[in-house]
Image (tube, helix red, strand yellow):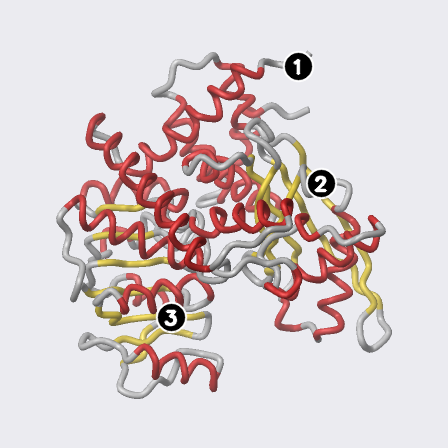
Amino acid sequence: MVGTVELAAKVVTIKDDPWEMALQQFWQVAGRLTLKRGIQEYLVTPHRELTVNFPVKMDDGSIRIFTGYRVHHSTVLGPTKGGIRYHQDVTLNEVRALAMWMSWKCALVNLPYGGAKGGVIVDPTTLSSGELERLTRRYASEISVMMHPLGDIPAPDVGTNEQVMAWIMDTYSMHAGHSVPAVVTGKPVSIGGSVGRKEATGRGCMIAAREAARILGFPWSGASVVVQGFGNVGSIAAVLMAAEGCKIVGVSDVFGGIYNPDGLDMPALLRHVAETKSVVGFPGTEAVTNKELLELPCTYLVPAALEGQITDTNADRIKARVIVEGANGPTTPDADAILEAKGITVLPDVLANAGGVIVSYFEWVQDLQLFFWSEEDINQRLERIMVRSVREVIELAQKQGISFRLAALQRAVERVAEALMIRGIYP
């Protein structure tokens, strides 16, 4: 068995590896806490890891073998919660890191969950709908040994959506012999999903940015915003920030980016994206690359794509005043140090994008009790939790003179450690 310290030593040679990033962040926090070394290693080591290699019949009758993962990082606070990612660059280390970040995210906002994550190495855009369904159902069957409505509850992530969750829920239900809507979240509302879930992560980003602006005295109405990743998270964050009076000056997707310092017409941009499937080519804008987009002048930069976007190679050129991490792990530890030296405020991922898992929790609770809430109730409850969490992180950071990321992770790790010590070590 490879121990945590040995595992860390093997991984840190890989520059900007997500698991390396997660480990570095944890050990920075662990050094500030009075925890025994064995407890620290328990907290950092993934609890369960599953790798599956499974066949899928393609439309032409051929068979392809795909590789997927499901990792449970921690079960201390409750059942594990975390999305499933379909992407050609998925790795086990990435899934490990995302699962750990989910543990800290759930603990930070006081949800009774541990962290998990899953993924399949696949570019979903290359598959037909039938191929995607067959892949999803087979993957769900393979990881069903780890899924349970009271044990491990997946959700959408990059490359997956409501339909994928519906297929997973149906597959699990067919094996169980009855409908089990609580086994996944992020489902269509018609089969037990929650109103407000699709917008939740982007809404949480907006609330986090707005509350930080209010507490710290940053500009808000009229402030310029750049969003990297105009998918579900980034587009919703942009629309809601624009509704608050912010000026969206730049956005991007996988095909490229656009920039207009005078601001983008969001309703027109959404229509353009619906018609062309990309932000590229939107009239009245300057074309920019995703790399250039990150370095545009703005008050708020929202990286809402993938991890490892802001690194030591570009952090010194970031001109934003505040970074609101819509994605998981978009900023490397080396970049954090550079940004802090430049006086740039970072609202970390475990705080800024927690809206998604918060409303996933609401969906799960509704499914378990078969009683559903209104969208107004959902949004009000989300706002209360996000506002409280932002205030707690800022207060701790100011009290101890540390970064918001360190404060968020410290509070989260302390909560998991406290629960672990109270529960004890079995046997």
Q: Residue at image x 43%, y 80%?
A: 273
Q: Is residue 315 left or right of residue 366?
A: left
Answer above or below: position of 364 versus 133.
above
What numbered label is drawn on residue 50?
A: 2
Q: In the image, residue 184 lies at what x, y percent?
A: 64, 51
Name the quadrant containing residue 108.
top left
What numbered label is drawn on residue 252?
A: 3
Three-letter amino acid code at the position of disc 3:
Ser
What numbered label is drawn on residue 69?
A: none
Q: Nearer the viewer, residue 121 or 377?
A: 377
Give the mark, 3 or 1, whose residue is nearer the N terminus: 3
Q: From mark 1 to mark 2, how far is it between C-alphas?
A: 22 Å
Q: From mark 3 to mark 2, how far is it between C-alphas?
A: 34 Å
* Numbered disc 1: secondary structure: loop
Q: From mark 3 to mark 1, how far is it between C-alphas?
A: 49 Å
Q: In the image, residue 172 lies at what x, y percent?
A: 77, 52
For label 2, the crowd category at 10 Å Cα-Cα, with few meaning under 14, some 14 to 19 and many 20 or more, is some
Indicate which label's residue lies in the foreground, 3 or 1.
1
Kindly check if marks 1 and 2 are in contact, taking CB atoms under 8 A apart as contact: no
Indicate which label's residue lies in the foreground, 1 or 2.
1
Kindly check if marks 3 and 1 are in contact, taking CB atoms under 8 A apart as contact: no
Q: Is residue 118 something that shows in the picture? A: yes
What residue is shown with label 1?
A: 426
